[in-house]
Image (cartoon, rainbow, N blue to C red):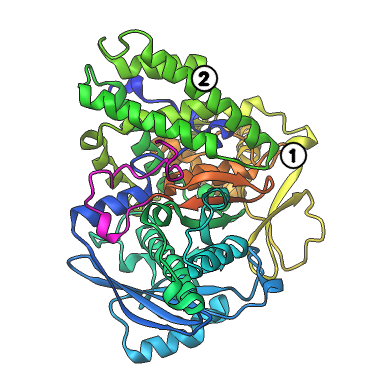
Amino acid sequence: MVPGNLLRPPDVVMRLARMGSAFQTRLSFMRSLTRRMAIESWTFSTPHVELDSEGRGCVIYSVCTGSRYYSLLAFSHPLDPMKRSDRVIADAWDATFNLFDGIPLDKDVQRLRGNTPRQEAGRFTSSELVLARANISERLFNHVANNLAEGRQPDIEMIADVGYLMRTTAVYGGGKFGCADWEKIADRADLGSAFQAEMLTVYLIRLFSLDLVEHIARQKGGVSAVTLDRPIRRFLGIGNATGLGMAPFLMNHQVLVHQWVSAREHALATVRGIQSVTVAQVETLNEVLEKCRVQVREWQVNDKIQSERVGKLSVDLAALAYHLAAGNRFDVSFPLEAIFLWASEHLSLEAQELVVSLLMEPFGELVDNLGERFNAAPAEDVWEPAMPLTQLKILIDRHYGWVNEINFQDSAETGRQWVYSEEKLEPRLGPRPYEGIADSETEIPLTVGWDVARLLVALQMSDLEQSVLRFCALHPWFRHTIHRIQNAESHPYGEVAENIIAAKFRPTDILRFNLAFFGVSKFDPKSDLWTRVNMYQGAPFPDELNSPWADQWTFACKPASLE
């Protein structure tokens, strides 16, 4: 049992500045998946390769989890470079993918060959679990292919500058566009945890990107061609471009987000409550810290705000290393709690959140099981119509005190509006009222703080002894807000404790928070609205899953950086 006073409170954890400083942990979805692959001895094969001299065609990857088979169907297409775009409105890509439930028959392959390249415009069935697409990083991809064709390894500095040969621009699961609903796999031991089908898809897309570049090199160079050296191959991840869609997801999945954050916070509290540590655990912590310091030095971004944060993070990690080396920091009772408190007092938010990740690293046996809390939540629709308004007011005071910090009479606090785009039904964020909004576009209800503030005004003019049901009969537009408030009592980590319609709001804070739970690294904001990241950089390949280092593959550094 974790002492309650070691759990960080929601109104600290769920602030945007801290959320926008999040890092992956050993509980993140990608690491949970590769760990499961190793423990359960998953096997991988490539039963079908059909690529022409330019790398166009189809490759099928098969995965046996012990109880089931899954197959990635990867289709590579000719693409005019002028049409290569990360934007959701794109209608052509270098490669498109389906994760198929089982082993596809020839008729399945032909059906998906005609539909997968069309993405949203295609027709899919419950046999398809995930739909995805990706573009090559043209400059690096061509550099790698040309060098391998001529018998040379690519330039490591160019590799480090980009970090991937392909980047996904969408990975759709959970029933979108006719694919299988989440319920189909929710009870499965292999892919039943949060986003595991999507993470398996990305893991296999990474394999495809590497196989594809080596195939093209062989076609160009013949017997002179070489394959990528294993350390360089491992250092190449899969890129991802993520935009505004994750913000509504986080806001609209209050219970699920609570489970993610609660699991991480309980893992942190468990570690903080450890009374003494072993020499081996200290060595692991110091080794991972050194990797972090190297990776942060290699983390280059153009975004001014993030670049300044990375620079400060590098300084803070040096201070942390000095602090740990100065004196017997681990020869005291509750040494990790002392380190956590020191970091909270002396380091930036970015460094504090990295310390959260670092402290968990040596203690997988204590915290990894908490990843089971990442499972998609069962239906927990908290709705208590008999609750008196007096009790509702108590819940508001308990969980939404941050609303009182905001002056919603100030137009800057309501200056932005979320809507669904007319063309792709994708989220958009703009001035209120949204410029150029079409009649068919509708506002997304993400005005949580404003709604609570308006509810408080209505409660001041109401009989607080009456029930929620009676109040909603007179004020039905508040039902959605009351539902959130009631959910917050049992799921307090599920609510962002700030105003996301304010003019100063940076959506990239929410994007990074979400992506950290996925397990990504090297956040590279391209604006306040979208970011590029690297997925599976440094991750073990199928034949490396049982290597001694395979469960600590994150914080990847370019080959030879640690020598």
Mark 2 or mark 1: name the one nearer the start of the chain: 2
Query: Tag 2, which secondary structure?
Result: loop
Count residues near mark 2 (Cα–Cα under 10 Å), then give few for <14, some for 14-19, many for 20+: some
Look at label 2 and name its amino acid.
Leu
Q: Residue at x 34, y 26 (%)?
A: 286
Quadrant in which the C terminus appears: top left
Report if residue 270 is visible in the image: no
Left or right of 277: which side holds 170?
right
Q: Which residues are magenta?
A: 539-563
Q: Is residue 29 left or right of residue 217?
A: left
Q: Position of residue 408 (x, y in %)?
A: 72, 33
**Mark pair 2, 1: CA separation:** 28 Å
Residue 211 rendering spot, x and y as whole percentages: 41, 69
Q: Find disc 2 in the rendering and name its residue.
A: 347
Is residue 475 or residue 545 the one in the foreground?
Answer: 545
Instruction: Say which residue appears at 52% left-offset and 44% top-offset.
Output: 522
Above or below, comparing residue 70 to residue 452 in the picture: below
What residue is at 55 percent from the left and 44 percent from the top? 523
Residue 547 shown in magenta: yes
- In which quadrant of the rendered image does the N terminus lie? top left
**Prevailing secondary structure class for the magenta stretch in the rendered image:** loop
What is the three-letter code of the residue carrying label 1?
A: Ala
Q: Which residue is mark 1?
A: 503
Q: Nearer the viewer, residue 260 or 57?
A: 57
Mark yes or no: residue 8 visible.
yes
The residue sitting at 66% across, 69% down in the picture is 89
